[in-house]
Image (tube, coloured by chain):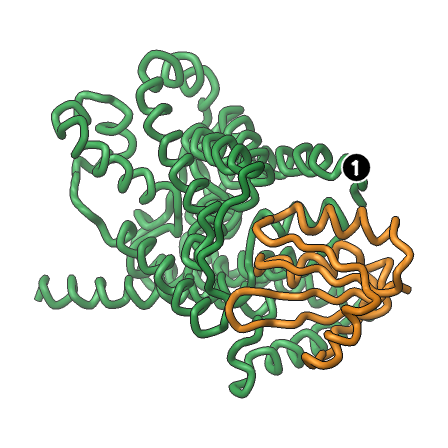
Chain colours: A orange, B green
Amino acid sequence: MIMVTEIEISNEEIKQLEKTAKIINMDGEVCPYPQIVAREQIQKIENDVIIIETDHVMATKAVPQSVIEYISKYSVWKSGSGQYKIVLWKK
Amino acid sequence: MIEYSGLLSLILTIIIGIGFGVLLQKGRFCFTSALRDYVAFKDTRVLYGLLIGIITMMLGTSIAYSLGVSNSHFWIPNYGLSNIIGGFVFGIGMVYGGGCASGTLYRAGEGYLHYWLLLISACAGYVIFASLFSIFFFPYFFTPLQIFEGFSLIESLGQTSVLVPILIILSCVLYLKKKQQLGLITNISKFNISSISINNLQSAWDAKIVGFGMGIFATLWFIVWGTLSVTGPQARWVGLTYSNIIGMEALQENIYWNNVVFSGGNFSISLDMIMLLFLIFGSFISAYFSGDFKIRMIKKNRVQNAIIGGMLMGFGSRMAPGCNISNTFSGLAFLSVSGFVTSLGLVLGVYIATHWMFRKVGCAI
């Protein structure tokens, strides 16, 4: 079983990352579409970091697991009003 | 005295309903995810939680049973090929729709219009199924296929049934010890405790501790009411609502509503129906205070998922009979044959539907 650590992330850090990361907006999508798109995109794109914007609660757990073999670490940012940003660092 | 015990049962029902809602919401505990994500990318997060929940419920209910809870609290339907087909249809529906029976309810509480539509579609499925029951499903589906008498090992063993979960737990521990992975258990328990720390009320809970909690609450429910089920009481809500449209007499003329759904002849609101409402409410409260609540619109191109998925779940749960909770949770915990065969069909349905949905990116298994 591959274990990848979840790290904490601040608002400032995420703003910095958003400048260079590939941002994918998945608002309104439910399982399993965020996972499918994450798996599809992580193999395609050249950026080192992918940020998935979502309002699906389950995605915060399922998306990192869906690309676990491609990432070195991940982070989940929570707005507090049902919005999330899932940051995935590619290996 | 009767009124007092009635009130106590109602209070316990409310507590248990809210408890289930909070646990499901905090654990992001979803049967679809447990099975689909294991097939798609070997994710064991919810699957292990589910297994812990089943074994906890098995231990809890067998202890309660040996201490005197009536065997009428076991739901042990007859079985046959009909269970596999029903489970299969339900499994396809839950992957395509994006949630199981319990997952749909708790996400309805989180504010998803997608899951409200899925729920309404499942309910519409019950109504259509009921109208087809006497002309098709009874003569051509249940009569030739549902031919074996129901059997549950826990129920049939009586007081000695407690030994079964104990033996299963012991053999799991021995197996892990042999594989020198006992450290896994201590790691899991450490992680569990830290995931429910008070200064971090907004964060998610570990699915394994949620599974354990589900097993405890399912045992309490077994003592208070009987077998934990979702689509059974849901169908009775639909029946009562439907009787307001077509009239009670017309409802009673239909053999499915009268002899199957309301088989006790009691056409009033029962505790298990109330429990479902508080499950949704519990999830809403939990989501609200965790910062996870939001009214989420449904995407236009996903409306078909909710409608078709819901219909399949509605039909599948009537055909099996039962949903993921009454079969893949309670049924497995009772070691009931109908639970196993329905789960087999359900897993098969999930497997095929997952492979179809992940066809572009591929599956791990």
Residue B49 in the image: state x and y as whole percent: 60, 61
Q: Is residue B345 above or below residue A9?
A: above
Q: Quadrant of the C terminus of chain B?
A: top right
Residue at x-position 63% and y-position 52%? B34
Residue A9 drawn at (x, y percent): 71, 79
Q: Chain of mark 1?
A: B
- Look at label 1 and name its amino acid: Lys
Image quadrant in which the N terminus of chain B is located = bottom left
- Say left or right for B280 vs B104: left
- Residue toward you, A17 or A41: A17
Secondary structure at numbered mark 1: loop
Q: Name the spot of residue B320 as percent of width and height, x first.
A: 46, 31
Q: Is residue B80 above or below residue B25?
A: above
The residue that appears at 66% across and 78% down in the rendered structure is B191
Horizontal side, residue B330 vs residue B42: left or right = left
B274 left or right, relative to B306: left
